Image (cartoon, helix red, strand yellow):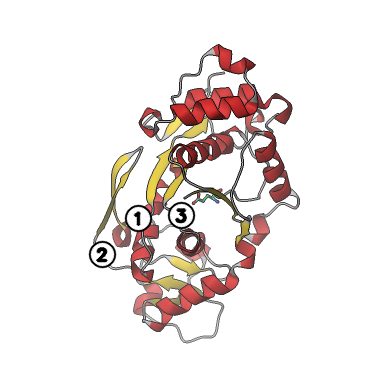
Amino acid sequence: MGRFAPSPSGDLHVGSLYTAAASYLDARANGGRWLVRMEDLDRPRVVAGSAAGILGTLELFGFEWDGPIVEQSKRAESYAGALDALRSRGLTFDCSCSRSWLADEERYPGSCREHPLVAAVPTATRLRVDPGPIMFADRIQGMFRQDVAAAVGDIVLKRRDGLIAYVLAVVTDDAAQDVTDVVRGADLLDNTPRQIYLQRLLGFGAPRYAHVPLLTEAGGKKLAKSARSVRLNAQAALPQLVEVFALLGLSPGSELLHASLPEAWRWAIRRWDIHRVPKRMALQLTA
Ligand code: GLU
């Protein structure tokens, strides 16, 4: 079971098309199902109409998802249940440190873990993270190892403004949806060890992970803010899809540009081999 989990904070761009195509091809080539989950938890960042826009674009590009679209905004009870399970085992603590107070810290210094607060102020909930390495074999990037306690410290599970943190939501959802294969952008590679740490505490099975390179502009600039990434042109879905197939290492020939969209997908599914995806954290688009 694979999944694509966009945040509805804007339109789908070529970088997200790349990630979506990788997870779709990986699921379909392995005879698996493919889900779409709207990660609309971070309310302040949600852009009205964006979720519908993303689904419309996916459809026009020929993606076919299985089952209903799960929206994180409707899953508060599940996240609260997971948080309570951790809290009742004494694995969490309240933290009143503000973002600005922590701004210069590379990792959480443990202030509220060691000195529980007394005053009634808005608090975040943090997980007590024990030292020790977390290791996993990423299917594209290879072995990855991180000591979460040393790298980030006690992670936030619920923010001071009451929002559930991404890490808790994603782990709860991947488990609830029986996701076996997470294929997503390399920006989340170093977030994965803390997800695995949390999965182990919650007794969830760990999916396999594959992190595809992040696409950047030709000069290496971030895509999301550049003109190129603003909007995909669904009227010209095929050439953009063929470009994405090329960047996934599938070496499409120019004759694919004359195929229909379903034919192009069938070709790519037959051809898919995750070992062909460039083993890099970033990949520049050709100008
Ligand atoms: N919602 C995240 C994003 O759009 C992706 C999370 C994931 O794939 O685990 O960056």
Mark 3 belongs to which amino acid?
Val
Q: Residue 79: x and y, percent? A: 52, 70
Residue 115 shows in the view = yes
> Closest to the observer: 192 or 125?
192
Task: For ligand 1, tell me if the residue under mark 1 lies within 8 Å.
Answer: no
> Closest to the observer: 27 or 223?
27
The residue positioned 50% from the left and 76% from the top of the image is 81
Mark 1 belongs to which amino acid?
Pro
Q: Residue 28: x and y, percent? A: 49, 39
Q: Secondary structure at mark 2?
A: loop
The residue positioned 70% from the left and 24% from the top of the image is 236
185 shown above or below 75 = above
- CB under 8 Å between callouts 1 and 3? no
- CB under 8 Å between callouts 1 and 2? no
Which residue is denoted by mark 2 in the rendering?
131
Mark-to-mark CA distance, 2 and 3: 27 Å
Label 1 or label 2, whichever comes before in sequence order: 2
75 shown above or below 90 = above
Which residue is denoted by mark 1 in the rendering?
193
Of tags 1 and 2, the one toward the viewer is: 1
Label 2 or label 3, whichever comes before in sequence order: 2
Assess disc 2: are there few (<14), some (14-19) or many (≥20) residues with their C-alpha within 10 Å of its C-alpha: few
Farthest residue, direction top: 254
Of tags 2 and 3, the one toward the viewer is: 3
Mark 2 belongs to which amino acid?
Pro
Whether residue 175 sits left or right of residue 256 in the image: it is left
Which residue is denoted by mark 3 in the rendering?
179
Label 1 or label 3, whichever comes before in sequence order: 3
Q: Residue 175: x and y, percent? A: 45, 62
